[in-house]
Amino acid sequence: MQSKKHIIKLLDTGSISIKSTNSEYPFNQENQIGNDSIDLRLGEYFYTINENYNFINTLDLTGNYPKELFNKHHFTMNGYILKPQEIIFVPTLEIVNMNSSRYYGYVSGRSVYARLGLTVHCTMTKFAYGMKSIVSLQIINHSPIPLKIYPRQKLIQMEIHEIYGKYHEYKDTYSSEKEYILPKTKDKEIELYSTSEQDTIKGSSIKKVKKKQIQPEMIKKFNNYFKVKHIIEGILGGGGLVSFFTTYFINKSSFWFVILIVSFVFTIDFIYTSIVLMKGINIDER
């Protein structure tokens, strides 16, 4: 692993070059090079998986499937609230060129954010010689609470390691990735299957499914409804029980049993509503 001094030397000699995709926010050696690694920043857009499908056929990502399965979003300075277990796909702001056959980059998440439960995985953890590309990231929130992230946040780091022996330049689909490339399977992925098996795999088509989503405005209305209901049931439930016990022994009528049952139902619902209100209702502020 190379030290800060050696990393700067590699950048000065052109063995490694790093350039921002946005000229307004250039790569800053002083701010982004640590003792033994280079901090890279999140880009300005990201993808989420479209949940309105019954499944993703991992062996048949051809045609327009990737465009249908992924939704593109743009970061704002208000940040993005990453929900627990949610996953997003983000490019780095920087393009990294590995120009020397003696070195490769190793990408990992930064410890300070991992301690919050935020996992950052590079889709190509090893950034090989010959790469002239953004770093494509997969970010997951393993925390039990939402985490807010921002564009240009230094969420990952790249270590530079030396290669021993002859190493061939990497040239493939993702070697010159200027923007995040959505997944697409190649024919060789299913060549090991028989013709009939391949037909079965390709015939397993995805379908859209309708998912009902409760809007924040509706959740607020439900919240207000619960509060009003909570007050009314507290009065009627408790009041009914008191009325029953104070008058039943004076006038033993079946009418009072009806009051008892209704009051009991109100009281149970009152307790349940209290529990709901204590837990609160989360509203997605995105």
Image (tube, grey):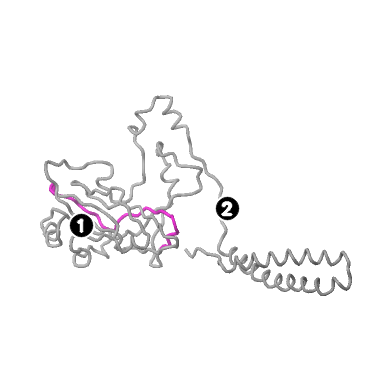
- N-terminal of the pair, mark 2 or mark 1, is 1
Q: Position of residue 70 (x, y in %)?
A: 43, 49
**Extent of the magenta region:** 80-102
Residue 282 shown left or right of residue 168 in the figure: right
Viewer-side label of 2, 1: 2
Rendering coords of residue 50 (x, y %)? 46, 49
User: Is the C-beta separation of discs 2 and 1 under 8 Å?
Assistant: no
User: Does 28 lie within the magenta span?
Assistant: no
Label 1: which residue?
A: 18
Provide the residue designation for mark 2. 212
- Residue furthest toward the top? 195
Instruction: Inspect the image, locate mark 1, and give the three-letter code of the amino acid beneath it.
Output: Ile
**On the rendered structure, is 80 left or right of 15?**
right
* Kind of residue at badge 2: Lys
Residue in the picture at 28% in, 58% down: 156
Query: In this view, which residue lies farthest toward the front?
Result: 249
Identify which residue, 206 or 269, lies in the foreground.
269
The residue nearer to you, when weighing 285 against 63, is 285
**Label 2's element?**
loop
